[in-house]
Image (tube, rainbow, N blue to C red):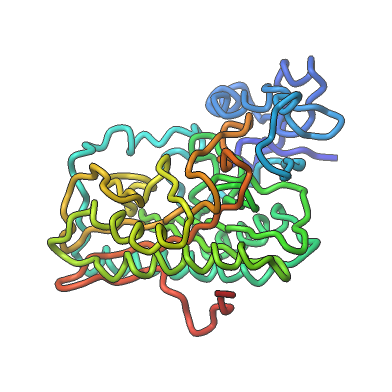
Amino acid sequence: MDINCCAPTCQKPAKMRCPICIKNGIMPNSHYCSQECFASFFSVHKLVHNGISPSNGVSSKFNNFKFTGPLRPGVVSPMAKVPDHIKKPDYAVSGIPVSERNWDESVIPKFESEDDLKKLRAVALIGRKALDLGHSLVKPGVTTDAINNAIHDFIISQDAYPSPLNYRGFMKSICSSVNEVICHGIPDSRPLEEGDIVNIDVSVFKDGFHTDLNETFPVGKIDAESQRLISATYKSLEEAIKICKPGVMYRRVGDRIGEVITPEGFSIVRTYCGHGVGQLFHGPPNVSHYPRSKDVGIMQKGHVFTIEPMINAGVFSDLTWPDEWTSVTKDGKRSAQFEHTLLITDDGVEVLTKRLESSPPLSL
């Protein structure tokens, strides 16, 4: 049986295997077409050396790990590939977003040309349709890996690239965050269960531009507290968007979210924030979601950024799993999130990733 090179942008037949993988009995993600391809991808490939167990595919780093809640990791399947003809971001092979590292953090990009705005709206529409597809698949028994694969296939069918794939070594095309997972959950083999909640985070790159959006969905019938958490989180995003226009300080976003969330008795995650998006996947400005932040900057026409409040049922503190991605609530209680990509206009804001008439209804 022919095996292709494991680098995500390479489709050539494999001619060699990683010697460390051979020694440790690791089969997935160990085959390469050449020493050159292996070397270029090694900064990401070496992650599989961090204790992948051949018996169940779950990192041995979880051995003796004290989980904060009931969720447990499943098996993570190999990284998907993207056809050669699709234009890719600078980190697609190396995992290193060089453009972000080189960007002057004090400069917030502006997008005002009709060509740029056309491309931004087009990639945002792909992201919206991809998220709606994922939403339609959410039900008990479906794995987050299956949702990831369906969204991956849809995005590449649009000649676009799933932005999370190999970004700083992330191995999947979406993030899927279940129950106590705040963000950056890795799609895996665990089937969704009745009563779960799941956030699906979709980001897309095409024609030189990224977009970013996410929503949290109930899996079947959920308890009243989880429903209240989802509804409050969505409301906080909607209310924050309403204040966006030229001349508004970015720190006001967190103040408005706090005005919605604090009376509900929930807490606001402080570790992660909204961000500039466009030519960069993540760039300036930082958009914090909690009150009295020290965010700098004032909204101006042409600014494109996300607001993505992460709201916890319990404490705001977070902890990262040993996979070095999955962020969970420190007390094991549930978390919800919603996100849009926004464009500041002459006198207000345009929601680039807005819901469509065809979007499946939210359970709010």
Q: Position of residue 168 (x, y in %)?
A: 49, 35
Question: Which of these two is toward me, 236 or 343?
Answer: 236
Q: Position of residue 214 (x, y in %)?
A: 50, 60
In this rendering, does residue 9 appear at all?
A: no
Where residue 9 sits in the image (x, y, percent)? 57, 42
Q: Residue at x 24, y 56 (%)?
A: 252
Farthest-out residue, left = 247
Q: Quadrant of residue 192?
A: bottom right
Q: Is residue 215 visible?
A: yes
Seen in the image, is 128 located left or right of residue 179? Answer: left
Work out which residue is located at the far bottom of the displayed protein and give it. Answer: 357
Identified at 17% across, 49% down, the residue is 297
Residue situated in front as seen by the camera: 328 or 226: 226
Picture quadrant where residue 30 is located = top right
Q: Give the residue drawn at x 73%, y 63%.
A: 195
Nearer to the camera, 40 or 338: 338
Q: Quadrant of residue 55?
A: top right
Q: Is residue 172 left or right of residue 274?
A: right
Q: Is 44 rendered above or below residue 296?
A: above
Residue at image position (61%, 62%) is 226
- In percent of width and height, residue 128 lies at 49, 69
- Apparent side of residue 55 relative to residue 180 in the rendered image (left or right): right
- How many circles with numbers are drawn on the protein? 0
Q: Is residue 156 above or below residue 21?
A: below
Looking at the rendering, in which quadrant would you find the C terminus?
bottom right
Q: Quadrant of the N terminus?
A: top right
